[in-house]
Each structure stands twice: as structure tokens, then as C-alpha cells.
Image (tube, coloured by chain):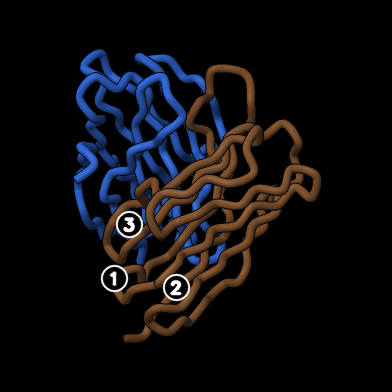
Chain colours: A brown, B blue
Amino acid sequence: QQQVKQSPQSLIVQKGGISIINCAYENTAFDYFPWYQQFPGKGPALLIAIRPDVSEKKEGRFTISFNKSAKQFSLHIMDSQPGDSATYFCAARRAGGTSYGKLTFGQGTILTVHP
Amino acid sequence: DSGVTQTPKHLITATGQRVTLRCSPRSGDLSVYWYQQSLDQGLQFLIQYYNGEERAKGNILERFSAQQFPDLHSELNLSSLELGDSALYFCASSDLGPRLYFGPGTRLTVL
């Protein structure tokens, strides 16, 4: 059962453009929604995260928009740069218990930013 | 550099064999998680340990087992390997917060 659905699978953007990746979840018990960035040959690294009590979080060129009623959240990368080319994963964590890191990941989006 | 180390970086073995993957968490992190990354399944949670005790289990096959030792390093044992077990295996660690720090991974190829 895929609890976090991510789209698109791949995305090509020109330098300076806006990259948008979307995720939808099913489990209303999720309470933490991070985005991870993964470069080839490396492990995923936390990019930005949001909790459901806020609708938007911005860190530099990266913004998460969160819509609790629609059970959707998205990553916006402003002024996309070739160095942003990587695979991006959305994820969600279920509230409660002691399994803090049991993240459910989306399938990933391969972002390519052309110079 | 996340501070999480994994060995070996690459592993090539044959079907039916057994391998052990090793992970050292960030200094001070008590939780260790194992994830499997394959092309068709994405990142799948396998198992979590906290200070030596199993804390949560995901879609981990019975052929796979793990443990966390008193020095907090962890090992993932994969036995009776099949072609479909070929994947990247990531270890991650965390303190009491929600952020996971992933290691560089071990690429397992089963021939």
C-alpha cells in the first residue's frame, strides 16, 4: 500500500525557472512531512520539513506548501539552478509511538535543471 | 557528510549467499534505521533499533535480520540472497528528533 504518492516522476526545468513537485498522502495520522534531496552515489539528505499546523514554510529558495484538507503538500524550488539537479523524495511520519524515524517515502522525482 | 558510516560501499555476491552490512551511527545517536532503495520500490523502511532494542519493523523479509550492538553500531544480515535483493541499502540515525541522517549506502549486487 503506497501511502505517499509523488508526482511527477521526472521534471526538466530551465535555469532560473520554478520547479514544483507534488505529494499526496492518505493517512491523516501523519504529523511530519520532510523533503529529502539525493545526489547520485549519496544518501538522501534532509532539505526542508513542515508540520501540519502551518500551511507554508520557506528556507531560501525552497518552499513547502501544505494543504491539510486536501492531504497534499508540495515543494517549490525558486530560481532553479543546475546544482539542484538531483532526486527529490517527499516523506511522511506517523504521529505517536517511539518510532520517530519510520518515514514513508514517495517514489521520488528526478529533477534536471538545464543551464 | 552526515556522520553516518556504512561498509562496504559495494558488495557483489551470488544467489543463495549470505552477507552482512555494517553501519555506524552519528556520535550520540541512539536510533538506527535500515532502508532499502530499489528502482521499482523506492525507499522502503526495513527496521529500526533504539539503544540496542528493536523498535519498529517494516517490510523486512524473514531472510533478513538486524541487530544493534552495545557500541550502537548496527549490522543488517541478508541470507539466501535472491536476484531481487539487489538494491541500495541505507542506514540512517537520529537522536530523539524526527530528522534522519542517512549514510552513503551499500550497493548490493546479487548475480
Residue at x 35%, y 14% (from the top left corner):
B51
Return the residue nearer the eye: A65 or B71. A65
Provide residue A38's location: percent of width, then percent of height: 36, 59
Rendering coords of residue B19 (x, y %)? 30, 45
Q: Quadrant of residue B35?
A: top left
Residue A34 lies, with reference to residue A109, above or below; the image says: above
Which is in the foreground here, disc 3 or disc 1?
1
The local crowd at label 1, few if under 14, some if 14 to 19, many if 20 or more residues have their Cα within 10 Å, is: few
Please tell me which residue is depicted at 30% across the width and 57% down the height of the picture.
B107
Q: Are marks 1 and 2 on the same chain?
A: yes
Are dots 3 and 2 in contact, CB under 8 Å? no
Sequence-first tag of 1 and 2? 1
Check the image and report above or below for B21 versus A76: above
Residue that numbered label 3 is attached to: B108
Judge by depth and name the residue closer to the eye, B71 or A34: A34
Q: Are marks 3 and 1 on the same chain?
A: no
Badge 2: residue crowd in 10 Å (few <14, some 14–19, many ≥20)? many
Task: Say what amino acid the circle numbered 1 marks.
Answer: Gly
Circle on res. A111 = 2
Q: Chain of mark 1?
A: A
Q: Amino acid at mark 3?
A: Leu
The residue under the point 35% across, 68% down is A84
Q: CA distance from mark 1 to mark 2?
A: 10 Å
B26 over A61 or under it: above or below: above
Q: Please, which chain is the residue tagged with disc 2 on?
A: A
- Dot 2 falls on a residue whose secondary structure is strand
Q: Secondary structure at mark 1?
A: helix
